[in-house]
Image (spheres, helix red, strand yellow):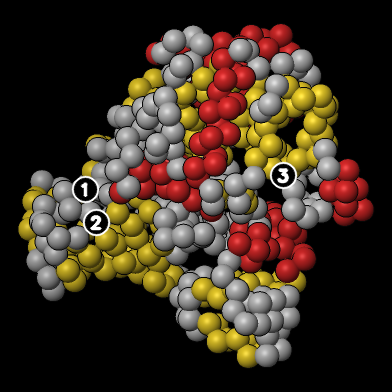
Amino acid sequence: MVIIPVVLSGGSGTRLWPLSRGEFPKQFHPLASERSLFQETLLRLRGLTAATAPMLICNDKHRFLATEQAHKIGVSLSAILLEPVGRNTAPAAACAALHSTAHHQSDSLLLLLPADHVIADVERFHQVVMQGAQAAMQGHLVTFGIVPDRPDSGFGYIQRGERWQEAGYFIRRFVEKPDTERAEQYLAAGDYYWNSGMFLFRADIYLAELERLAPGIVQHCRQAMAQARCDLDFLRLDSAAFSACPSDSIDCAVMEKSDHGLVLPLEVGWNDVGSWSALWQIGDHDAQGNVLHGDVVATDSNGCYLRAEHRLLATVGLHDHVVVETADAVIVAPRDRVQDIRHVVAALQTAGRNEPLHHRRVYRPWGFYEVIHTADRFQVKRIVVHVGASLSLQMHHHRAEHWVVVHGTAQVTRGQETLLLTEDQSAYIPTGVAHRLANPGKIPLELIEVQSGSYLGEDDIVRFEDSYGR
């Protein structure tokens, strides 16, 4: 028996804005521990019997962020499949199954795990997964139902049917997120579980059921895999084929219609970290019931989640609220209204604003940059380049750049010149001149960049060479 963990990391986490952004979503933030949710998901797999190195399915724009975080905790990924667009979990699982059948035994088990969950009891999680593996080897499609401890209307539910051996139950039905009254009824009935979104099944059985129940998904995923291309350590799914694939969840496409479904109860201290109120629930509360992160002073305030990322956050007389401060945005909401933060994000997207997508600090495979100040015709950035890394050889049509080194050593390519700059030295890059910045030193390179010109957008880049395949 071989278990191939498949980590699904395609979500954007809009309900955790302003910390979670499109280019840096919630799974890559340290929200419940010192490590990110993505890193905790990878580490949770250590010690799981018969498990191989995990496979990752993620959005193309998160590829370097994910691989860097995996590298930092010493986890090797067996494969990294890049989705050009999000198409929900059923197509993602299909591509994972197709990759598995091509590179492993056809009856290998796929353990699909979202990248943004919290699980407190890892040992018990492993035990239930191994129980599920026995059922999956017999051809069942296994999902894990979280035993509810409250009537929560924020989750979908699974109603169990007849018992299957000792480990679990046949599935009677899936239920969409109920209102509070119905959630209370489900809790009282005792035969409903929260839908965790975690699955375990044989790759060949899943593909056969998907072929029977949603053949369009299989058709487009086969084409996307057949025309996929390798790029460094990544496998890029064909954009045209995958974009044409129907978008559907594993639940709706397969589990609700299949006779092979089983649900195994799971009590492991689980949380899907789907909102700021969820983080309040699992956080460490002070004597007033507040959860505090960062530089926070809470006066006559109780039942609040207060998070300061960049400056002092102070409250007076605030009750049952969420306040989250970042460098460029602050959200204030009643704790029972945090689900509506997605409407704020939608409004910002409609207005064409940058805040739903980027933080002021933007990560790149070579390091990161921070926008310090922007005004008419000029912009100031702080740039940090990792040891041994380099930016692409590029040119801009509408802006010139002035680089001042404040820490480390910079190797600057400017046209036909190559310059070596140390601290307090600078270089000017005129508009239209090909240039490149690299760090040949032993310490991180930090510099200040002043851009000037008629257009300062990030899309004013013509790349000639790039080490990262962009």
User: Which mark sits nearer the N-terminus, 3 or 1?
Assistant: 3
Q: Nearer the viewer, residue 429 or 346?
A: 346
Q: Disc 2 on helix, strand or loop? A: strand
Check residue 390 in the rendering and tell me which mark sits there, or answer none.
1
- Against 389, residue 264 (above or below) is above
- Against 328, residue 82 (above or below) is above
Residue at (33% x, 57% y) in the render: 368
Check residue 107 in the rendering and tell me which mark sits there, or answer none.
none
What's the amino acid at mark 2? Val
Mark 1, Cα crowd under 10 Å, few <14 / some 14-19 / many 20+, is many
Residue 267: x percent and y percent?
Answer: 64, 45
Determine which quarter of the picture holds residue 167.
Answer: top right
Residue 217: x percent and y percent?
Answer: 65, 17
Provide the residue designation for mark 3: 147
Determine which quarter of the picture holds residue 114.
Answer: top right
**Residue 395 appearing in the image:** no
Circles 1 and 2, Cβ within 8 Å, touching? The answer is: yes
Mark 3, Cα crowd under 10 Å, few <14 / some 14-19 / many 20+, is many
Distance from Cα at disc 3 to Cα at disc 1: 49 Å
What's the amino acid at mark 1? Ser
Q: Disc 1 on helix, strand or loop? A: loop
Residue at (42% x, 61% y) in the render: 34
Mark 3 vs mark 1, foreground winner is 3
- Against 277, residue 86 (above or below) is above
Residue at (52% x, 23% y) in the render: 110
Provide the residue designation for mark 2: 385
User: Which mark sits nearer the N-terminus, 2 or 3?
Assistant: 3
User: Which mark sits nearer the N-terminus, 1 or 2?
Assistant: 2
